[in-house]
Image (spheres, rainbow, N blue to C red):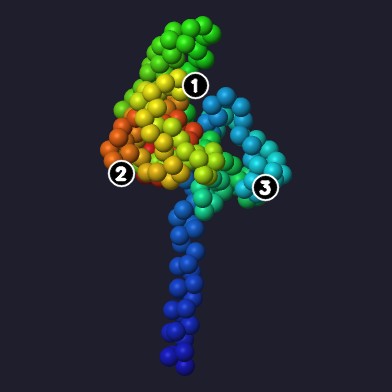
Amino acid sequence: MKKRVIPLLLALALLMLTFVPAATAAGITKYVYTRNGKPLNVRAWPSVNSSLLGTIPNGSAISVENYTTDYTWAVIRYNGQTAYVMTQYLVDGSPVTPVTPMPSGGSSQGLIYSLENELRSYHVVSPYTVVAKPVRATGWVNLRYIPSTECCHAENLYANTQLTVIAETANWLQVRKNDNGVTGYVMRQYTISMGVGSSY
């Protein structure tokens, strides 16, 4: 009789262990960061065409339970039910206030004004890993030599390219490519953090 009980107890123990990874993966705190300051849409399913359950204000802290396999959507609890938000609008710390929009005028003056405002928020961080996440799965993200969309394209960063973050500004991450060591800037909304101890 005892010989039958022991295998049964072992089977129950193994069954319980299968639920541990899901429990330990839950409760990752992220913050909503929409560049235009608007609230983030919460969906019933991981699709922009699914039902809208509500919105979360920009800057709010949320608890992420999991991600979809392509990391495009984060799984959260919203009003007691499972819901989804787009990961490109989540960061690892309370977001910095967006910079003032550049004034109209000459392109060189606008570029200088934009850079001055952006670099005021520049700060070095403890290195952590992110991956590039283009809006289109078959597209790429621009790596630039300066934190501006106005000039200085360095390379194309294709989906899931691993990058080490070394510094941050309000809207950009200064990164180093893990494969070839090239350093530049990428817009933070087109990355997903993969490291522990990130410092947005």
Tell me the residue at 28%/41% (across/down). 180
Which label lies toward us, 2 or 1? 2
Disc on the earlier residue, 3 or 2: 3
**What numbered label is drawn on residue 44?**
3
**Residue 100 in the image: above or below residue 60:** above
In the image, farthest residue toward the left? 181
Q: Nearer the viewer, residue 40 or 93?
A: 40
Disc 3 versus disc 2: distance between alpha carbons? 37 Å
**Three-letter residue code for mark 1:** Pro
Q: SS for tag 3?
A: loop
Disc on the earlier residue, 3 or 1: 3
Using residue 149 as the reference point, say whether residue 40 is left or right of it: right
Label count reads 3
Q: SS for tag 1?
A: loop
**Residue 161 in the image: above or below residue 13:** above
Disc 3 versus disc 1: distance between alpha carbons? 29 Å
Q: Which residue is mark 1?
A: 98
Residue 76 drawn at (x, y percent): 57, 46
Tell me the residue at 48%/18% (across/down). 99
**Three-letter residue code for mark 2:** Asp
Tell me the residue at 45%/60% (across/down). 21
Q: SS for tag 2?
A: loop
Q: Is residue 110 visible?
A: no
**What numbered label is drawn on residue 164?**
none
Q: Which residue is mark 2?
A: 179
Q: Nearer the viewer, residue 115 or 78?
A: 115
**Three-letter residue code for mark 3:** Ala
In the image, farthest residue toward the right? 51
Q: Is residue 54 visible?
A: yes
